[in-house]
Image (cartoon, coloured by chain):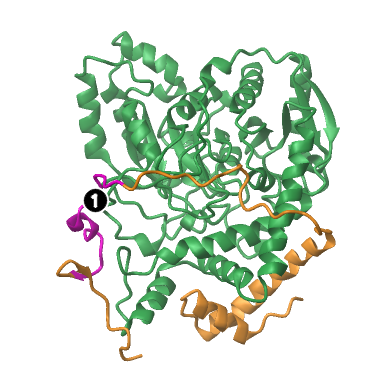
Amino acid sequence: MSLFDHTIKELEAKLHNKEITVQDLVDESYRRIKEVDGQVNAFLTLDEENARAKAKELDEAADATASLFGVPGGIKDNIVTKGVRTTCASQFLDNFNDPLYDATVVQKLKNEQAISVGKLNMDEFAMGSTNENSSYTPTRNPWNTDYVPGGSSGGSAAAVAAGEVLFSLGSDTGGSIRQPASFCGVVGMKPTYGRVSRFGLVAFASSLDQIGPITRTVEDNARVLEVIAGHDEMDTTSANIDVPKYTEALTKDISGLKIAVPKEYLAEGVAPEVRESILEALKVYESLGATWEEVSLPHSKYAVSAYYLLSSSEASANLARFDGVRYGVRSENADNLIDVFKKSRSEGFGPEVKKRIMLGTFALSSGYYDAYYKKAQKVRTLIKQDFDKIFEDFDVIVGPTSPTPAYKVGELIDDPLTMYANDILTIPVNLAGVPGISLPCGFSENGLPIGLQIIGKYFDESTVYRAAHAFEQATEHHKKRPQLGGAN
Amino acid sequence: MADISKEQVKHVAHLARLAVTDEEVEQLVDELSAIIDYAEQLNELDTDGIEPTTHVLDLKNIMRKDEPKEWITQEEAFKNAPDHEDGHFRVPSILGDS
């Protein structure tokens, strides 16, 4: 049994009772990384020297009351870490070795004495759902390394699933926390838009991006979100709304909880074994005293189109900053300034990133703006209204996170439209801005995890966590572990 | 199939400051056409009178006093720069050989 089979709360007690030290926890993290990361490729950069020094310092500290005291975690590589290489898994930032500041979320983790062991692999600039768009070695699924871990926060989900860290941070623009959490059998939360500061998150689509935690248990997840959430004057889109104690919402009492199940989320296109798992989960909810009813999100089928137009448009503007002038890899083949821009970008960006910049630039260009970009924004309004209407009568929406379990490596790489379409259950949540979590609710016939998605009202992560925790505590799915490394 | 021409792809690539090879142009014509074609489904929806959503929260302009604060130094700003000289980022001439 690994130390990381315990919750943060259990480890806190062990630290308090001197059964273990912070150095033991950090040792466990690097031991496991050395054991299995050659197969999983979850990490792009390790920060071992600093992490070990910090562990030693904490073991000598008089005050051990910080809420993530000595807890080893990993940070997605699109979140800036002072002095620690931050690449977004892009060749453009391959030499970005010395970022000048910490993202607000990283500073908040440090304030609570969490220890970052390193930076986690991802699809380049968070564009992708398999991690195959990493410009380094793609991450593999710890449950079966012939399969993808999902994306774009594939490294963040795989590192937790493989027992390399106790928690990680990911970012979610169209499902990039929840879908990999689903594929890797862990818990991933995309908070309400504005709940967590984006300062220091390398922007993909600013109106959709949100940082959130990935963990093995709902309780740990709530604990990490409590730390990273809250208003930040450095991010004017972060909401100035009090952060509740999410861990106190985990009462296990969900009697009377009203669950909506959109028929579109169990429709054709959802794999039968996924549908079965969700129906089983709904039985668990009934047994716990909740009620559920079928509802409709009639515009969800338009979400994928609207999302790709909007997110790519925002990306085309956000990624304009990568010009080869102030940081990043500059092309050596450029003779004039415009060549520096064009060649540095063309040599530094991978095909998916270029494609989305092109799509976004097209959708924003003169003559097409109204037909594509503005139209998509209007459809976004309709999608948001679908959610508003359901939340007038229900507490949460429940369905699968992804229509299928993990894909085989290479299976969808040449079929982008199918790959995009598979994000249909996560994308509407980002377009509406509401919070959503994925947690394990079963396994496919070939042993791959299946994820349950719970979607809540704006800024009501507490109810989402309460519903997720009650299900988790009534089932055993979260206790299964991938057979990876060592003697296996 | 949506009609996106090679010329359009080249024009958009220039706007996006991307250098594209002939092969990439061919590929992007196909890929962008397929995505735009797919996105045409949005036209099934009547959105007359629907307000566009740029942002899900009710955001207002946030004002603050314009006061100097501690931030990175000039030296730090150059730490990750490909090239710099005399306190400036250095780039090739704007009208160089091309």
Q: Residue furthest front?
A: B65
The residue drawn where x is 73% and y is 26% is A395
Q: Quadrant of residue B52?
A: bottom right
Q: Which residue bears the numbered disc 1?
A: B72
Q: Quadrant of residue A10?
A: top left
Residue A279 showing in the rendered view: no
Magenta extent: B67-84
Q: Chain of mark 1?
A: B
Which chain is tinted green? A
The residue drawn where x is 61% and y is 21% is A469
Left or right of A239: which side holds A72?
left
Q: Nearer the viewer, residue A448 or A199?
A: A199
Q: Is residue A220 inside the magenta stretch?
A: no
Q: Quadrant of residue A306?
A: bottom right
Q: Position of residue A80 (x, y in %)?
A: 36, 47
The residue drawn where x is 52% and y is 22% is A244
Q: Nearer the viewer, residue B66 or A218?
A: B66
Q: Is residue B74 inside the magenta stretch?
A: yes
Q: Nearer the viewer, residue A36 or A232?
A: A232
Amino acid on which disc 1 is placed: Ile
Secondary element type, mark 1: loop
Residue A359 showing in the rendered view: yes
Which chain is tinted orange? B
Q: Position of residue A127 (x, y in %)?
A: 53, 57
The residue drawn where x is 74% and y is 70% is B37
Q: Main secondary structure of the magenta part?
A: loop
In the rendered image, the vertical position of residue A314 relative to residue B61, given as above or below: below
Q: Position of residue A334 (x, y in %)?
A: 32, 81
Q: Residue furthest top?
A: A17
Left or right of A386: which side holds B75?
left
